[in-house]
Amino acid sequence: MAYPEHKIPPRGRGSSRWFLFLTFFHLLPFPWYMAVAGGLAPASFLFAAGLSSLFITDGDSLAFAAFLLAPALIAGALYYFLSWLLALLIGKLQAPVMRTLSLSLVLAGGLIGAMNPIFISGGHGSSSAFSLYGFIDALAEFGVPPSAAVAYFSSLALVLFGLLGYQHLAARHQAMTVQRWQWQRRLQRRVVVGSLLILVLSLGWTHRTLLFVKPLADMGIAAAQYRLAMVIKEKTGAVYGSSGYQRWLVRAAEQGHIKAALQLALSPRSREEKFRWLKVAAEGGMAEAQYRLYQELSKSSPAGIESSASASAWLKQAANNRYAAAQYELGRQFISGNPGLGIEQDVAEARRWWEQAAENGYAEAMADLARRYQKGADGFPRDPRRAIELLNLLADSYQSGLNGLPRDKQSAASRRAAAEQIAAFEERSAQNDPLAQAQLGRELLEVRGATIETLSEALALLEKAASQGDSQVQY
């Protein structure tokens, strides 16, 4: 579309208009909430508080955002008309210096006026007063982070000074060409459309629970019902009420959603209800629920629920489903056997399950295996290299806070020191140090549940020490 040159405004007038608009919008007080109680606040305050409320994902905040944004938009429209009119009048001044001086005086007057107290009305007749100096703290009460407010006002100051300088320099040059005017108009439109699009998309993403998950949950989709319940639990969907969390979980669990059933079992209203939901999750194949059901059945079971046989079956299912705690527990039962669970003593099985638990990062399995491998206790074969490896894995876990362990440098150092001590002692024995061989041989002879191989190694070490002149060993 072509624009006649006589309709193109003089250069700098648009900059003056936006300079005035931003000044009025951020500094002039505007009445709001007049129907109940008088209140004065800058339109920028209302806009910032209302916009931030849009991104809180409950319905009450959406209503509050609309309540604040309405007067902000009304004020913005009035201030834009005032800015357009005043820029037109200032533009009639011939000297660029006079135009710049006039705009600077408007900004100075707004800053001076903003030093006076501005009142915000609250509920039940309460109100608070603040000036421009307290603007950032007042915004923080409405959920706007102070860092974001500081960054915004710093950028605003740069924009204002940039507009002031641009209009001064632009007024000293020739009028703008039609092509340049058209280019600027297109750029402005694209910026506005792009900003609105980003706002709409970000709002849609923030409120995806309200827009997408809630309708799907109402349709009866279990995954959406579970997701909605968890959002309510995290207090980001409080519009549905605290009772909604339990209600949506029950609806999902009744359709066989195993995560929902486990959540209900973790906070049950009765022990029977706990068994009910654990069984739903366990039968659905959730290893954690299978292990928890084993734990409950091992204690005692309510009437009508079998205990020992089913407890053993659930423990084995959880272990076969690679649940590390169940693998460790099953190995522990195999160490000494448990007739009540129908588990006979089997050290090889215990070792197999503990090794699997250790591979899954279970710290207790690593520690128990390292202790038994070091000396060959409880029927385990002696394997100092594997003991050193497991102790170093434990140390790494404590160092980085991995595998469910707390970050603890002292525990990490003690495990690493133990591994180094075992390695040094084994090296001394391998290098025919009679003292090391005699000490290790005596320790292995005293190991509880030592295997034939461990006892044979102990005697061999003592014979080596004796052959090198150790009289006590010889005796």
Image (cartoon, helix red, strand yellow):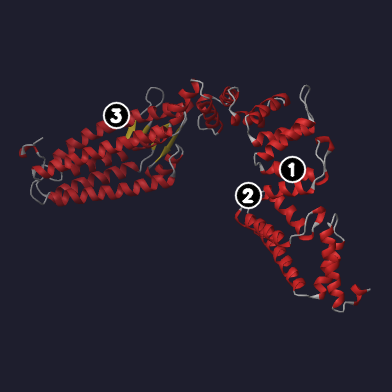
393 left or right of 300? left
Amino acid type, callout 1: Glu
* Residue occupied by mark 1: 329
Element type at marker 3?
Answer: helix
Q: Position of residue 432 (x, y in %)?
A: 78, 75
Say few, some or many: other residues with alpha carbon within 10 Å of mark 2 (under 14 / 14 to 19 / 20 or more).
some
Amino acid type, callout 3: Ile
Q: Of label 2 and label 1, which has the lower sequence position?
A: 1
Q: Which mark is residue 27?
A: none
Residue lying at the far right in this picture: please name it. 475
- Disc 3/disc 1 C-alpha distance (Å): 68 Å
Q: Residue at x 40, y 30 (%)?
A: 65
Q: Nearer the viewer, residue 100 or 114?
A: 100
- Disc 2/disc 3 C-alpha distance (Å): 56 Å
* Residue occupied by mark 3: 74
74 left or right of 273? left
Say few, some or many: other residues with alpha carbon within 10 Å of mark 3 (under 14 / 14 to 19 / 20 or more).
few
* Residue occupied by mark 2: 403
Quadrant of the image containing the C terminus: bottom right
Q: Is residue 293 visible?
A: yes
Q: Residue at x 87, y 61 (%)?
A: 446
Element type at marker 2?
Answer: loop
